[in-house]
Image (cartoon, rainbow, N blue to C red):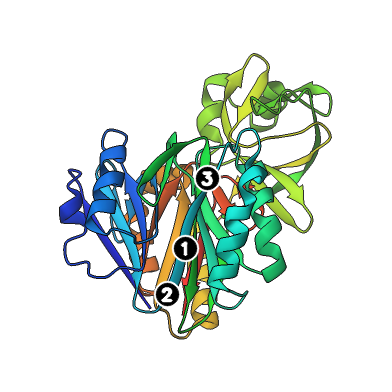
Amino acid sequence: MRQFFGMSRHGDLREAVSGLVMPQMLLLMSNTRQFEEHVRELERMFPGVPSIGCIGMSYDTQVVEDGVGVIAFLDGVSAAANVLEQVSVMPVKYIERLEKDVSRINGSRQDTVCIDFCSGNDACVLTTIYSVLKSRGVSLVGGTGDGGKVSANGRVYEDAVAYALIRNENGKVKAYKENIYHTKGDYRFVASRTDRARYILGALNGMPARDVYQKILKIPEQQIATQTFRNPFGKINGDDICIISIKEVVGDSLACFRQVNDSDVLVLLELGDYRAIVKENIQKIRSDFPRISAVFSVNCLFRYKLFSEGGYMGEYLQEMSALGSHSGLVGYGEHYNNRFVNQSMTCVVFE
């Protein structure tokens, strides 16, 4: 199989797909102003080709911040695309669509992946989707787009998740998650005074969350929203830790980008040597895949900002491109199987 990436910095979709012939699956990443127009135009250009899309930045060896990017899979894939609606209320209502597509693609753990673009309520969405994928061992990689909109097969949806099932007919696939943080000290907190709907974390071990965070890190309140780049929270999930980014201060509470529940056990994280971690992860992928056709990844917006501020983003994309054809989305939250995480990178590698 092959992966195509095309882009236009000024939003010209025809420029972005120049040279693309007979795609078998399409991923669209557009800007807020042109998203709906691009969805319709892409369907006119490639009628009947399965597609999903969202509002967001895209990249291969460089980042397209405010234009349009198109990723296509071709020459040896089977694919299906669809949408689950009403994700804030009851996404399971539409689960039969996914069940039928999974059966039709007839994928397996070894050769199939689900890529999703979501408009929100990610944790519930992932639980719903993975209830179907788990029985076949199919991995999921995806992320949250901007603007509360996604697209599937030429139509725009709000309050929905668009998904693409892709089966590699000539090799295996495998999903990865990259975490550049580790625990800081032996801090361990029990969350309380949470507001699940607003992603509010009110208290840690019975003390106001804002005060606890400030006291440990010795920072002023106005620095909290950017300090999360270096010191997010982590939620213990079995033998893994799901990263939780801080969005803003709300009174003496902290608003986060991921839901926190009463009695969740949290830890404080700190930034590791991300250059070394990236190299180590690339080496692992090389070890698992001597022959690579394509890599699709989702990088968190906060990783993008962190890497850019450190002068590393260009180098990072060059290092990833050395694996082979690499492209992806800058997301507002990352998906890995049934887990919704922040400040991470998830990717799928195709043999």
Label 3 Cα crowd, 10 Å radius (few <14 / some 14-19 / many 20+)? many
Residue 215 in percent (x, y) is at 69, 26
Kindly identify which residue carries mark 1. 80
Residue at horizontal 74%, vertical 25%? 194
3D distance between C-alphas at marks 2 and 3? 22 Å
Front-most of residues 247 and 198: 198
Q: Judging from the image, what secondary structure is the residue with disc 2 in? A: strand
Residue 173, compared with residue 60, is above or below; it is below
Residue at horizontal 27%, vertical 33%? 33
Q: Which mark is residue 161?
A: 3
Question: What amino acid type should be assigned to the residue bearing mark 1?
Answer: Ala
Residue 146 in percent (x, y) is at 42, 37
Residue 195 in percent (x, y) is at 71, 24
Front-most of residues 15 and 46: 46
Check whether the beta carbons of the residues at disc 2 and disc 3 lie within 8 A of each other. no
Is residue 165 in view?
Answer: yes
Residue 88 in percent (x, y) is at 61, 33
Q: Which mark is residue 77?
A: 2
Residue at horizontal 59%, vertical 21%? 249
Front-most of residues 101 and 321: 101
Residue at horizontal 27%, vertical 52%? 42
